[in-house]
């Protein structure tokens, strides 16, 4: 039996990174908001401003993260991200004055940026061509698992151990798991180090850069990509979509708590993440075979519809049903932008090119809370 292509090991590490990045990052924001307002008496607006700092930090770091992976490989970036994410989560548990709140969110923003979409997709980009959509979608199922696994455990740990102890434990766990994985598995930067091409194909059978992309150009630079409508339409479209998505996710616990209580709200966030997991599984099946821009438009339309239902027909049944549908779409929207950029611009300098789009998307998302 042929051995498993090493690229799938890289995908597995990226999946684990996504569990921690989204569990303690994006999905964790709604838990932090609820806990900090309750534990420290801080206003929702004040904590939301700190969440905005988290997203802004992620946005500003995206180009540097993508370029660093292109230049140095994923291993040092993932180690840095794990230390920042774990350290930020632990530091949040130790705050005792409002002015201290922003520092942990900056650290978490740096960690999330390194271990989330930009970092994961730049790490995977050299390893796959025919399966580039599937590989990214599989890795980003970890984002959904972050909601399913981390959020209920985090809420339970806060309840039983206290806010400070729970977050310290979560931060230490992040570092203890991710640093060894990154050091051991991500020592390989591309299949060329193994004498193979993308997807494990023989090198002569693989095009120099990105066969199958929508562009005939080989080897885009960041400057050239920034002159195209393709890059800016991706950045603009996903920016609008994620402004709303991030705002909804940040306030999801607060929105649900009056209807189903804090425990029920935590489980609803988890169920929404599970729904996103199934959405990503669907995307993994179809990503390499469909016209992704039209597919994205349809998903965004469904999200708009279910948010309108929540606004017009408030109540527990509507909130739960709409959240599950929203989650199914949410997981795909988070995944689609890097797949589109990878397909249209290829693997060469992908990290730097996607970093441009990611900066605008994340900067816009920062205002969602």
Image (cartoon, rainbow, N blue to C red):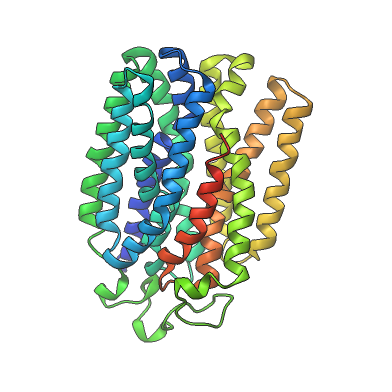
Q: Residue at x 38, y 60 (%)?
A: 66
Query: Which quadrant would the N terminus be assigned to in this image?
Result: bottom left
Please state which of residues 340 and 39 is positioned toward the viewer in this rendering. Answer: 39
78 relative to 66 in the view: left or right: left
Note whether residue 147 is visible.
Answer: yes
Total numbered badges shown on the rendered structure:
0
In the picture shown, does residue 140 fall above or below 193? above
* Residue 75 on image: x %, y %: 26, 56
Q: Position of residue 257 (x, y in %)?
A: 58, 17
Instruction: Identify which residue is drawn at 31% across, 15% down.
Output: 161
Q: Residue at x 43, y 50 (%)?
A: 60
Question: Relative to 146, does residue 336 appear above or below in the rendering?
Answer: below
Q: Is residue 4 visible?
A: no
Q: Outermost residue, right direction?
A: 312
* Between 212 and 230, the one nearer to me in the picture: 230
Indicate whether 8 appears above or below 313.
below
Q: Residue 90: x, y in percent? A: 29, 29
Q: How far across and down, in percent of the image, does residue 41 sit?
A: 45, 12
The residue lying toward the viewer, choosing from 29 and 149, is: 29
Q: Give the position of the C terminus as an image quadrant.
A: top right
Horizontal side, residue 284 vs residue 181: left or right? right
Quadrant position of residue 135: bottom left
Q: Residue furthest bottom?
A: 204
């Amino acid at each position: 039996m042929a051995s498993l292509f090493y690229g799938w090991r890289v995908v597995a590490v990226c999946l684990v990174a996504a569990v921690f990045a989204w569990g303690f990052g994006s999905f964790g924001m709604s838990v932090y908001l609820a806990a900090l307002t309750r534990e420290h008496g801080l206003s929702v607006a004040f904590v939301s401003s700190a969440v905005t700092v988290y997203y802004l930090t992620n946005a500003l770091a995206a180009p540097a993260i993508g370029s660093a992976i292109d230049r140095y490989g994923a291993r040092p970036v993932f180690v840095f991200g794990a230390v920042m994410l774990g350290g930020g989560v632990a530091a949040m548990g130790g705050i005792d004055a409002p002015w201290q709140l922003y520092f942990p969110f900056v650290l978490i923003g740096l960690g999330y940026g390194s271990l989330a979409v930009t970092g994961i997709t730049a790490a995977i980009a050299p390893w796959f061509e025919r399966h580039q959509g599937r590989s990214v979608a599989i890795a980003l199922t970890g984002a959904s698992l972050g909601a399913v696994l981390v959020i209920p455990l985090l809420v339970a740990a806060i309840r039983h151990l206290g806010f400070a102890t729970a977050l310290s434990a979560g931060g230490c766990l992040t570092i203890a798991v991710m640093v060894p994985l990154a050091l051991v598995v991500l020592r390989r930067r591309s299949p060329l180090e193994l004498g193979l091409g993308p997807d494990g194909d023989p090198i002569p059978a693989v095009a120099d850069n990105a066969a199958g992309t929508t562009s005939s150009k080989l080897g885009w630079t960041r400057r050239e990509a920034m002159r195209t409508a393709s890059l800016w339409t991706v950045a603009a479209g996903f920016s609008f979509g994620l402004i709303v998505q991030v705002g909804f996710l940040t306030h999801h616990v607060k929105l649900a708590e009056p209807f189903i209580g804090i425990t029920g709200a935590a489980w609803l966030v988890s169920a929404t993440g599970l729904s996103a997991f199934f959405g990503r599984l669907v995307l993994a099946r179809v990503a390499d075979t469909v016209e992704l821009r039209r597919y994205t438009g349809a998903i965004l339309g469904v999200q708009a519809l279910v948010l309108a239902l929540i606004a017009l027909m408030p109540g527990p049944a509507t909130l739960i049903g709409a959240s599950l549908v929203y989650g199914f779409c949410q997981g795909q929207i988070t995944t689609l932008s890097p797949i589109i950029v990878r397909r249209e611009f290829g693997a060469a300098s992908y990290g730097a090119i996607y970093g441009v789009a990611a900066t605008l998307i994340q900067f816009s998302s920062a205002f969602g809370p």
